[in-house]
Image (cartoon, rainbow, N blue to C red):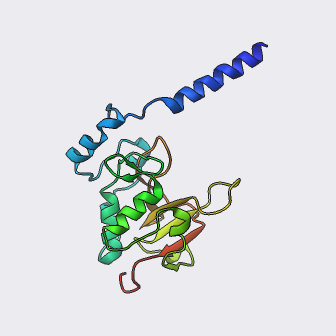
């Protein structure tokens, strides 16, 4: 019985972690709109792991043209909290809500969810052939096959994405994408 009590206590401890409110710079999530407005949604992040990624401006990338505009717009949302189903940066964004918002600002309409976004544009053969502004897609759920995550390629093996609950939009390693799509016009290098 003692072992069962320990397991139940551990489960309760883990559940409490998921139920705790997410804090951004010591503020409650309901304060995010004022934080976002005062910050202008530019740069900065409350996620220490995102701070380890190099600044986009220091990566030596050619960010001119439409791809550069996509990356510049994506960078404005760094630090916005992840919110499943989120499409409003004042409340939070999920991965596909983030990519849809960024591309809409550039005049490109994308479907709402990552699995549908993975059918937009043209395929790119490999990360080596990817350009800034391309979409990177991932299948992270072995129990449910299919695309379930998307990010925006920055270059140099990095992407900006809204990763998962408890995190923020951040720059991170692109890793091994399942699929890569170019949704910007071909002349928009």
Number of numbered callouts drawn: 0
- Asked if residue 20 can be seen in this view, the reply is yes
Task: From the top left corner, tell me how far across and down residue 46 is, in percent.
Answer: 36, 41
Task: From the top left corner, tell me how far across and down residue 23 is, in percent.
Answer: 38, 34
Task: From the top left corner, tell me how far across and down residue 42 is, in percent.
Answer: 26, 53
Left/right placement of residue 183 relative to residue 140 reads left
Looking at the image, which residue is at 42% across and 35% down? 22
Looking at the image, which residue is at 53% across and 29% down? 17
Q: 70 or 97, which is in the foreground?
A: 97
Quadrant of residue 15 within the rendered picture = top right
- Asked if residue 60 can be seen in this view, the reply is no
Quadrant of residue 187 within the rendered picture = bottom left
Q: Residue furthest right?
A: 1
Looking at the image, which residue is at 33% across and 36% down? 30
Q: Is residue 50 above or below residue 105?
A: above
Q: 74 or 132, which is in the foreground?
A: 74
Q: 181 or 118, which is in the foreground?
A: 118
Q: Is residue 100 above or below residue 23?
A: below
Q: Residue furthest left?
A: 38
């Amino acid at each position: 019985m003692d072992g069962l009590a320990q397991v139940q206590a551990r489960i309760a401890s883990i559940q409490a972690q998921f139920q705790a409110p997410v804090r951004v710079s010591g503020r409650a999530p309901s304060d995010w709109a004022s934080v976002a407005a005062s910050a202008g949604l530019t740069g900065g992040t409350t996620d220490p792991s995102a701070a380890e990624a190099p600044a986009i401006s220091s990566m030596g990338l050619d960010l001119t043209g439409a791809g550069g505009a996509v990356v510049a717009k994506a960078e404005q949302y760094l630090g916005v909290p992840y919110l499943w189903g989120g499409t409003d940066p004042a409340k939070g964004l999920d991965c596909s809500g983030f990519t849809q918002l960024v591309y809409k600002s550039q005049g490109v309409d994308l479907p709402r969810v990552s699995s549908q976004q993975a059918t937009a544009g043209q395929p790119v053969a490999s990360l080596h052939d990817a350009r800034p502004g391309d979409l990177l897609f991932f299948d992270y759920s072995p129990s449910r096959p299919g695309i379930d995550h998307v990010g925006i390629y920055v270059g140099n093996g990095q992407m900006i994405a809204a990763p998962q609950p408890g995190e923020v939009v951040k720059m991170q390693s692109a890793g091994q994408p399942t699929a890569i799509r170019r949704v910007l016009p071909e002349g928009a290098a």
